[in-house]
Amino acid sequence: MVSLSSNYLGRLAPSPTGYLHLGHARTFWIAAERVRATNGALLLRNDDLDAIRFRLDFVAAMLEDLRWLGFTWREPVITQSSRLARYRAALEKLHAARLIFPCTRTRRDVLDAIGAPHEGGADDEPVYPPQFRPPTDAPLPPLGEKISINWRLRVPDGEELGFHDGRCGLQRATAGRDFGDFLVWRKDDMPSYQLACAVDDAELGITEVVRGADLIKSTFRQLLLIRALGHAAPAYYHAPLMLDDRGERLAKRHDSLSLRALRAQGMTPTQIADQFRSQEATNS
Ligand code: GLU
């Protein structure tokens, strides 16, 4: 039988801010399985916009670990730092539509205003206090060539949003209640993760975004951006997060579960994939 390639286009989007661990590998393995099942194609996106935690050696390690696991992707690798003009164009569109506003409040201001503790716990951005917003009819300052202030998207308060997740089913959130006005551009003149990701997924024609369930709330933000920019939204599939033996989510600090540590201990890509396969079989 001749197998025809489909229109499915997925992506792996690691951030080079640490070594990849088993949790990343499992999400990426699920993403690759979705591609295989549909005979689609896969892009690799290097999410390298975090100037503080970025390290070039993490990019090399990321590519090496992914190749070691047997992943293949359609070249070239998409590097976010080389797409800044696209993100800036999107920002200008949001500015022209008056959907964003400049914000000089610090994280501390926001936490104080909502009476939240300053440290730890929160998995997600706090809801931006509406009293910090400028009125909708306030004059909007120009963006300027070099941006040195944070810009946020004004979310449509009270709008009920929903999407059907390929793994988790129907997801719902209310704008302004479950999440608030969020950052689209940072005062270090870089796009936020939300903006860059929304622009890339839409403009690169990704048909399904497969990623960890910790990003479900971000999906609502990205859907708002994609809609505001006039693009069609991809489908979403959020994979369950992998937990350690204490029930905590794996993080880059779990060095013993980094793929390099596992490789050094003699674990093979086949053993890793077999483990994922049997976990998926148990879950389904
Ligand atoms: N680079 C992001 C991360 O590692 C993933 C973003 C995404 O898949 O949308 O958390």
Image: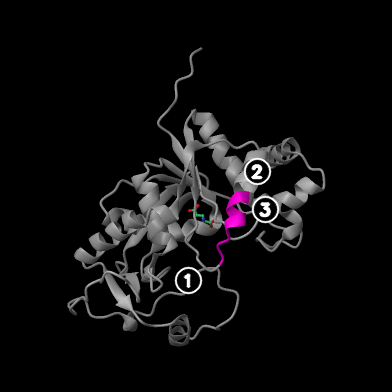
**What's under tag 3, amino acid-wise?**
His
Name the residue at 53% across, 50% down: 211
**Are there few (<14), some (14-19), or many (20+) residues within 10 Å of tag 3?**
many
Q: Quadrant of the C terminus?
A: top right
Q: Is disc 2 placed on a helix, strand or loop?
A: helix
Determine whether 40 is above or below 1 in the image.
Answer: below
Residue 189 percent coordinates (x, y): 37, 69
Residue on which the image places disc 3: 21
**What's under tag 1, amino acid-wise?**
Glu
Residue on which the image places disc 2: 283
Determine whether 116 is above or below 123 in the image.
Answer: below
- Position of 192 with respect to 159 (left or right) is right
Name the residue at 64% across, 44% down: 64
Q: Which mark is residue 125?
A: 1
**What's under tag 2, amino acid-wise?**
Asn
The image's colouring method is: one colour
Q: Which residues are magenta?
A: 53-60
Q: Is disc 3 placed on a helix, strand or loop?
A: loop
* Circle 3 or circle 1, nearest the eye: 3
Q: Is residue 58 magenta?
A: yes
Residue 229 percent coordinates (x, y): 27, 55
Name the residue at 63% across, 39% down: 67
Q: Main secondary structure of the magenta part?
A: helix
Gap between marks 1 and 2, in whole Å? 30 Å
Q: Is disc 1 placed on a helix, strand or loop?
A: loop
- Position of 136 with respect to 187 (left or right) is left
Query: Residue 97: in sight, yes or no?
Result: no
| Dot 1 and dot 2 residues touching (CB under 8 Å) | no
Gap between marks 3 and 2, in whole Å? 21 Å
